[in-house]
């Protein structure tokens, strides 16, 4: 029988014949419902040639948050004469008509375009969409690039355009990344648009071959451990339904290159069934911290955290330490790195003129004052210009900012950011922005942790799916016991039995003395979820009235608009 030649429809559209419009947006935030577009940039390409470009600033109809201006360089003054989105959108939709849309982290950009269409009465664009983040994760290995950020990929493919958080510049860089990724995809026999779209989501042969590893895993909450042929733990995870979660690793939905690589090595999956989802989450953290699997990217080294300490001496200073001691000193943390702790220290120094030298000083010490004294950033106790009593005012201000009220730090650093922005020193302002965010988030986190870790015992319950209750005993911020009380069971004897068999927890110094910060945060997230009932609380559970949480809310709102840039 003669072979039948396929039609063009069956073969698909060759990528060399596809018109792509690579686009990027800048916005005032991360939510299309709350924020607006400030800039659109797009490049139309076909067969490697640029056919046209589209670029315009957009008046968002309101002020641009300082944090966004620091990142993008787009200020209120720049957009005051720019057209509104109702004038820009029709031209943009005409520019992209009939093309395949391409963006880096495309979900963010397409959501804003669809929201603008809905608000102005236009039908949403039905163009096919290619996300260069997904494509990069499919064709590049971790050995080649450490992440899928646009800047990383642009450097890898030697793009002459450096991404800078401006729409057209980033779109041009994404064009080069797209061409590089299409070239890589060709080695996987991807030559048509249809093949490109399906390629990103297709499971690898290794994933298909090892589906049987999920067969012995039960439908229950717990922890799963992927192991190689020697029994070494490669990866640990948790799920409310172990069977469904483990099976998903062998399907097209699992596209992470690092995990797909792990699947190729894995030879078995062990599991630990847990009573509740919270117990599974806590056990996952503890197992990762103990086994340190090479394919887990978080929680592997809980012992490597650092703290910012206000030292106990006649003239205290801020020191970065790896251990919390029972010395009545003020601590802030934990931080995941020395750099983060140093950023928080710098932010605190902006508000409080503590000395920054490392030498030990006494009331009788007399040495020449350093340049910080001349700049008005230190009272020079080393030269006798401040007595211990005078200096103690700075010490108490620092302690208050670390433990109770971060308002002084927020005000001081924000004022400096505003001044730098007016002077168009955006890079310096962005550094201060990140330092302030590091301090405020660390203070808010520590205050939340300390509120729970100071409670000797708490018993809390949440409704279970079958009408019963998930019961947990928490001691000093550590999960001491977990159980499921069946529907109709008398609660008092059950709770008394669970408490009697719970783990004994010995308190220690600092806000995370009985468990890692991550474990206590897991418990806090559960306690703050809907439907939780407090059965017993031994002590008081409260936060400082003027705590850092109020400032953290402002910072998180500003950073929400920057989250999509994490891949740019």
Image (spheres, rainbow, N blue to C red):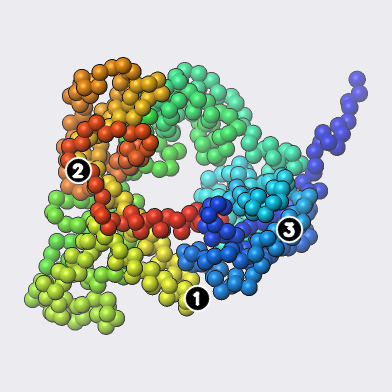
Residue at 89% x, 27% y is: 4
Q: Which residue is mark 1?
A: 424
Residue 29 spot, x, y in % from top left = 52, 57
Residue at 53% x, 54% y is: 34
Q: How many marks?
A: 3
Position of 82 with respect to 325 (left or right) is: right
- SS class of the residue under badge 2? loop
Residue 272 spot, x, y in % from top left = 37, 24
Q: Which residue is mark 2?
A: 540
Residue 229 spot, x, y in % from top left = 45, 26
Which mark is on residue 565?
none
Residue toward you, 260 or 426: 426
Position of 200 with respect to 411 (left or right) is: right
Which mark is on residue 90?
3
Q: Quadrant of the C terminus?
A: bottom right
Gap between marks 3 and 2 measured at Cα: 58 Å
Residue at 53% x, 30% y is: 249
1 vs 3, front mark: 3
Q: Residue furthest right?
A: 2
Whether 260 is drawn above or below 384: the answer is above
Q: Are marks 1 and 3 in contact (CB under 8 Å)?
A: no
Residue at 47% x, 67% y is: 66
Whether 427 is drawn above or below 134: the answer is below
Q: Quadrant of the N terminus?
A: top right
């Amino acid at each position: 029988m003669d072979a039948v030649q396929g039609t063009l429809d069956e073969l698909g559209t060759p990528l060399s014949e596809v018109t792509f419009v690579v686009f990027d947006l800048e916005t005032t935030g991360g939510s299309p419902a709350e924020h607006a577009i400030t800039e659109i940039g797009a490049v139309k390409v076909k067969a490697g040639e640029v056919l046209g470009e589209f670029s315009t600033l957009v008046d968002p109809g309101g002020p641009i948050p300082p944090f966004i201006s620091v990142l993008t360089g787009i200020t209120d003054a720049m957009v005051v004469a720019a057209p509104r989105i109702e004038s820009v959108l029709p031209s943009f939709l005409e520019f992209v008509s009939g093309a395949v849309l391409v963006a880096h982290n495309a979900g963010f950009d397409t959501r804003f375009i669809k929201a603008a269409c809905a608000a102005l009465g236009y039908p949403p664009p039905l163009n096919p969409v290619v996300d260069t983040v997904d494509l990069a994760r499919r064709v590049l290995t971790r050995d080649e690039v450490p992440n899928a950020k646009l800047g990383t990929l642009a450097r890898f493919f030697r793009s002459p355009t450096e991404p800078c958080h401006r729409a057209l510049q980033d779109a041009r860089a994404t064009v080069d990344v797209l061409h590089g990724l299409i070239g890589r995809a060709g080695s996987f026999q991807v030559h048509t648009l249809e093949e490109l779209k399906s390629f990103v989501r297709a499971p690898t042969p290794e994933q298909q071959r090892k589906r049987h590893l999920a067969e012995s895993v039960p439908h229950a909450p717990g922890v799963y451990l992927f192991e190689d042929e020697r029994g070494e733990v490669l990866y640990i995870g948790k799920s409310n339904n172990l069977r469904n979660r483990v099976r998903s690793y062998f399907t097209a939905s699992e596209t992470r290159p690092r995990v797909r690589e792990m699947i190729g090595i894995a030879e078995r999956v062990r599991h630990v069934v847990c009573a509740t989802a919270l117990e599974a989450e806590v056990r996952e953290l503890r197992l990762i911290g103990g086994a340190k699997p090479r394919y887990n990217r978080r929680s592997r080294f809980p012992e490597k955290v650092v703290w910012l300490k206000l030292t106990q001496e006649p003239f205290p200073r801020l020191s970065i330490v790896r251990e919390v001691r029972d010395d009545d000193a003020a601590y802030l943390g934990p931080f995941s790195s020395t750099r983060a702790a140093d950023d928080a220290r710098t932010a605190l120094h902006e508000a409080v003129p503590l000395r920054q030298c490392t030498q030990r000083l006494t009331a009788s010490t007399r040495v020449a004052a350093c340049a910080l004294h001349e700049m008005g950033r230190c009272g020079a106790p080393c030269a006798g210009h401040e007595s211990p009593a005078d200096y103690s005012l700075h010490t108490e201000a620092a302690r208050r900012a670390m433990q109770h009220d971060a308002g002084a730090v927020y005000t001081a650093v924000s004022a400096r950011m505003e001044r730098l922005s007016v002077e168009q020193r955006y890079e310096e302002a962005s550094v201060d922005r990140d330092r302030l965010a590091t301090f405020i988030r660390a203070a808010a986190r520590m205050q939340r942790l300390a509120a729970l870790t100071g409670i000797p015992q708490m018993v809390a319950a949440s409704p279970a799916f079958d009408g019963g209750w998930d019961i947990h005993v928490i001691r000093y911020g550590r999960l001491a016991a977990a159980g499921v009380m069946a529907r109709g069971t008398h609660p008092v004897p059950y709770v008394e039995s669970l408490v009697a068999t719970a783990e004994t927890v010995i308190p220690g110094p600092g806000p995370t003395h009985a468990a890692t910060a991550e474990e206590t945060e897991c418990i806090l997230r559960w306690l703050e979820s809907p439907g939780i009932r407090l059965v017993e609380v031994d002590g008081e559970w409260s936060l400082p009235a003027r705590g850092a949480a109020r400032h953290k809310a402002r910072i998180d709102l500003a950073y929400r608009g920057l989250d999509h840039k994490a891949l740019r």
